[in-house]
Image (spheres, rainbow, N blue to C red):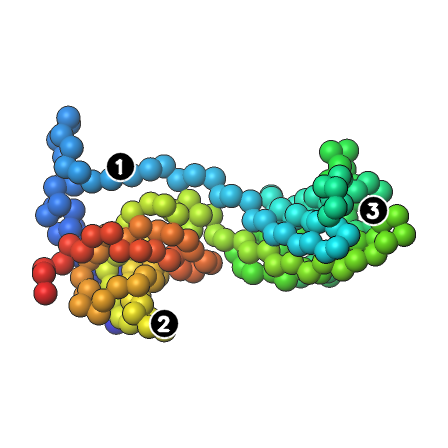
Amino acid sequence: MHPTVTAAFFSLALAVFWLGSGAFAHEGEDHGMAEVARPQAAASPRAEAASDQFELVAAARRGELTIFLDRFATNAPVANAKITVETPSGSVDAVAAADETYRLPAPWSRAPGRYDLIVTVVADGAADVLPLTLTARGKQAVARTGKTVAVLFQERGRREGQLIGKSPWLQSVHAQAPERLIGRLVEVRVTGGHANSLAGEVVTDFGVAA
């Protein structure tokens, strides 16, 4: 379907949906629609890895990667370790911080994506290599997780029983749903997301009963 036609059709369908559902409630009236929540701050992407010697947690925030390193057997923080991380920006050495963490610049973590990292740890004569994967989601996807949105399903997805549609922001949304919902406006609860799409589950079918 042409993008212009999609946008026009979605706008018309969405208008019909809101009018038909009584979304324009007068003061003091409650028509059963879920309250629109304000966007929340995106959660920091995190990843964990462990070996016989070490347990490591990495968290990305504001373009910086913070590493928590503990002894696997005792959970005691590991001090004075040498930590080197293979990142999308190359090999970077982490610097020990006063709060018993290790930090390094991670400008790549600001962009949504899946990042495979390799962390080399050397401490007290022991050395280990810990691979981990950090998944950074877009702020919009994180803010909308748990929210209910109107989705116009358009076609079948790549997975069995999956449909793909558009949100009010014309962002792709995929969910498990019967094919009879193609071409209908459906209420979907967002369960997650990626850089360019959202995942959800059908809450209510506002289309005409088949």
- SS of the residue at dot 1? loop
- Assign the C terminus to one quadrant of the image: bottom left
Kindly tell me whether residue 11 is visible in this rendering. no
Dot 1 crowding, Cα within 10 Å, few <14, some 14–19, many 20+: few
Give the residue type that dot 3 points to.
Ala
Distance (Cα) linking label 1 and label 3: 49 Å
Compare marks 1 and 3 and give the one earlier in the sequence.
1
Distance (Cα) linking label 2 and label 3: 45 Å
Mark in the foreground, 1 or 3: 3
Compare marks 2 and 3 and give the one earlier in the sequence.
3
- Assign the N terminus to one quadrant of the image: bottom left
Compare marks 2 and 1 and give the one earlier in the sequence.
1
The extreme front residue here reads 73
- SS of the residue at dot 2? loop
- Residue topped by disc 3: 81
| Residue 13 x %, y % | 17, 56
Mark in the foreground, 2 or 1: 2
- SS of the residue at dot 3? loop
The picture quadrant where one finds residue 38 is: top left
- Residue topped by disc 2: 159
Circle number at residue 35: 1
Dot 3 crowding, Cα within 10 Å, few <14, some 14–19, many 20+: some
Q: Nearer the viewer, residue 29 or 90?
A: 29
**Does 68 sit left or right of 45 as displayed?**
right
Q: Which of 110 and 126 is in front in this view?
A: 126
**Does 25 sit left or right of 106 as displayed?**
left
| Residue 80 x %, y % | 85, 42
